[in-house]
Image: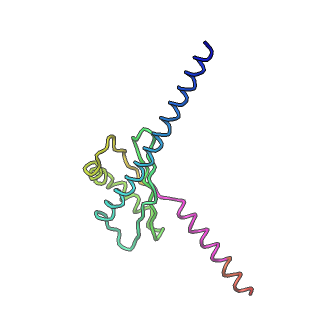
Amino acid sequence: MKKVIFSQHILKNAKREYCRFYMTERINKVNSLLEKEISTILLRDFDFPGSLLTVTHVSASANLIEAKVYVSVIPEENMEKIVAVLNKGVYTVQQKINKRLNMRPIPKLIFVKDKETIKAGRVEELLEKIKNQGEIEK
């Protein structure tokens, strides 16, 4: 009797792990697809003169109800204004994604500024400064 219970427990855990792996893979694919489609839509339909807008990554929730779209803007002074414009125009982006993708549910989009690119830029500046100081000492 103990063998049967033990085997059922192992099967339950294996099934749970398989489902978790499958859902993680699906979310990764959804994130990648949304990133590609949103980038295309922003390139075609939005114009920010004097600024470079990049969709760095998309992070959908596990239940696919909402997705955060992380954007980077150069120059950084325009970041707040551009993110506000994108969040006001999110309905337009959402409609175009609904038409282009054959997927349900389509997550609700929320545009967020990507702080990691700002940190990476600061690290690059510091490394360049250290490199220049090393050349001066030689």
Magenta-drawn stretch contains 94: no
The x, y position of residue 16, in whole percent, is 51, 31
> Which residue is at a point 42% across and 49% down the rendered structure image?
29
> Which residue is at a point 40% across and 44% down the rendered structure image?
66
77 left or right of 120 in image? left
25 left or right of 7 in image? left
19 vs 8: above or below:
below
101 vs 129: above or below:
above
45 left or right of 84 in image? left
> Which residue is at a point 46% across and 71% down the rendered structure image?
75
The image quadrant of residue 93 is: bottom left
The image quadrant of residue 36 is: bottom left
Quadrant holding the C terminus = bottom right
* Count of numbered circles in the view: 0
The image quadrant of residue 83 is: bottom left
Q: Residue furthest top?
A: 1
Quadrant holding the N terminus = top right
The x, y position of residue 107, in whole percent, is 37, 44
The x, y position of residue 45, in whole percent, is 28, 63
Magenta-drawn stretch contains 123: yes
> Which residue is at a point 47% across and 58% down the rendered structure image?
113
Nearest the viewer among 60 and 53 is 60
What are the residue bounds of the magenta stretch? 112-129
The x, y position of residue 28, in whole percent, is 45, 48
Nearest the viewer among 128 and 76 is 128
Q: Main secondary structure of the magenta part?
A: helix
